[in-house]
Image: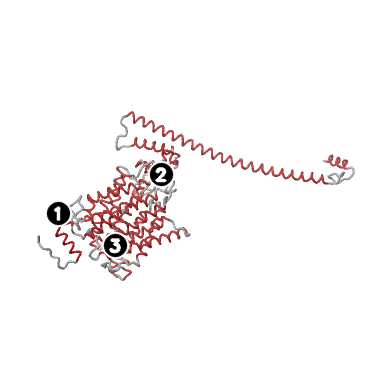
Amino acid sequence: MAALNLTGLLPDERWIAEMRHDASAECEAFRGNHRADVTYVVTMAARIIQMQSGFAMLESAYQQPNNSANIMMKNMLDLCIGVLAFFLFGYYIAYWDTHQIGGFADAGVDLAHWFCCFSYATTAATINSGALAGRVAFFPYLFLSTVMTGVLYPICAYLSWGNGWLQKLGFVDFAGSVVVHQVGAVSALVSTCILGPRIGRFKNYRAWKGVWSVVFWERHDDAYYREPQDPAEKKVFIPFRKCRHPVQLLFGTFLLLVGFLAFNPASTFATTLGADLLVAHSSATTLLAAAGGGIGGMLFSMVYTRSTVVRVPELTNAVIAGLVASCAPAAVMPLSVSPLVGFVAAILTLGFEEMLAYKQIDDAVGAVAAHGPSGAWGAIAVALFADKHCGGNPDVVGLVFGGGEAAWLLLAKQLLGMVVLCGISIGITYFSVYLIDVTVGFRCTRACELIGLDFWEHQFNDGTFDKDNDKAEFFNAAKLRESLNSSCWPSFSSPEKRYMAEQKVRELNEEQARKASEAETKKEEKEKAEEAGMDLGIEVAILKKQVQMLQSQIHLLAAARIRDEKETPGEDMFGNQDGGEVEEEKWTKGL
């Protein structure tokens, strides 16, 4: 074996050279990184993947009690299906030009890099899970998640990090404010506009009209999305509430905060050769940005409510907004600026969330608002606040620190990068959702949404079906109708069984119509009784007045009688002493 020349190598480089020299021919290519770097990247990536539990906790905290398990299932399968999609073709699409990858279905020779890059991909995919919660069908969502992990994110990663056009242009996004978060938020916004809001989310909802109804394929009228009026549906409908489990929401946010403290530093992909200082710097800026976001959320809530009330959803979304905004500038912005970046991100996010609600766009957990505006702001913050420090020396100094013309040019590149990546996200998402919708349908059925996705899609019975006969009857009727309308597979083995099922559905329809008619009749009778009650009340009031007048007269007569008893004997009520009987008789005759 030839002697190894280590002249001029740094200690870390010397270790790598020795390991490559001693490795077998099959393993030599895998010894391209220092063992400390490999351990660091794998550990950080595992913590980033753990963020899935934070997303799942946060999203389920917002949901109706009959949809919580469905959210957990989607986040679990985001991971399971996503890792296969990223292994089969996603990683090759993103990094074929920068890493030694044999083709599709290959993780290359830098397995730590593959592992870490997947953790970013699954984070981008789960943004859709939160925004579409409560009404998207299970398997169509998994298809969209696969497209996100295996196609959309890898294309954006290639352009920005894989020696693609935007990277060569000079677009800077250290840890994915745009590539991960804004791309995911734009995809979720497009999907949400097509899907429509949850039933009962907006009491006076107005469906898409005019050209927008064509763009977003509106298939329902206004009444479909409003609170149910049908008696059978009203019995199983759960009224909307923004957040049902505030403690769970806060706990999920804590998990995400800890995960982001790995998300940003992991983008160094190393701790050796001077990268350790950059890891420390990006960790500190990330935490400070989260703190600024939390303060911004607290103040926004107090101003919005005009009190000292600090609401939980505003605080948690603001913290996440600060973390998202820190991703792009984490390695270049000074520590003193980091809280300001987080604070501005919080205000933008909470304001955008209110605007979406005003426009009646149902962002179920605030995912679009938390990842969209704050992601864009993070990319802009690079051009504003980049500065040199011990951890790294950026090529361009920001406008605030005297970057001049170069900083203006960087700002233009940042804006162009955002437009390009968001355009790709819109195009791929729109095509994917359209393909799903025309084939199997993107939104779950109305009965499924009212019953709850937990039981309908996962057969999770929380006990209510055993106690609530109305809910069980509604579910059985809806399932029978779905079976009769199914065109995907034969639901009945013989014409006789199908005829019996159709007869059962007709009986159920007649029973529901009868119940609806009875409910309407009872309502009319109640209204008539209330009107009659009002008339009776007026009569009673008149009688009471008459009784009061009679009581007054009786009191006067009683007082007169008492006075007569106390007067002098022989003197009548007219004051006559003698011959009183004669005067009384004259007076009586005169009357």
The amino acid type, in three-letter code, at marker 3 is Gln
As rendered, which of 42 and 398 lies closer to the eye? Answer: 42
Residue 265 - label: none
Residue at the image point whose x is 34% and y is 57% from the top = 258
Give the left or right position of residue 328, taking residue 295 as reference. left
Q: Amino acid at mark 2?
A: Tyr
Secondary-structure class at tag 3: helix
Q: Nearer the viewer, residue 252 or 6?
A: 6
Is residue 211 visible in the rendered image? The answer is no
Marks 1 and 2 sit apart, C-alpha to C-alpha, by: 62 Å
| Left or right side of 119 for 291 | right
Residue under label 3: 414
User: Could you classify mark 3 by the number of other residues whose Cα lies within 10 Å: few (under 14), some (14-19), or many (20 or more)?
Assistant: many
Seen as rendered, the residue at the extreme bottom is: 402
Question: Marks 1 and 3, how far apart in space?
Answer: 42 Å
User: Which residue position holds label 1?
Assistant: 26
Q: Residues within 10 Å of mark 1 (few under 14, many from 20)?
A: few
Which of the labelled discs sits on residue 224, or is there none? 2
**Do residues under tags 1 and 3 come within 8 Å of each other at their CB atoms?**
no
Percent position of residue 294, x then y: 39, 60
Query: N-terminal of the two: label 1 or label 2?
Result: 1
Position of the N terminus, as image quadrant, is bottom left
Q: CA distance from mark 2 to mark 3?
A: 42 Å
Q: Position of residue 195 (x, y in %)?
A: 35, 47
Q: Residue furthest top?
A: 496
Q: Position of residue 299 (x, y in %)?
A: 43, 61
Q: Secondary structure at mark 1?
A: loop
Judged from the image, the secondary structure of the residue bearing numbered disc 2 is: helix
Dot 2 or dot 3, earlier in sequence: 2
Q: Is residue 255 visible?
A: yes
Residue 39 drawn at (x, y percent): 24, 58
Look at label 1 and name its amino acid.
Glu
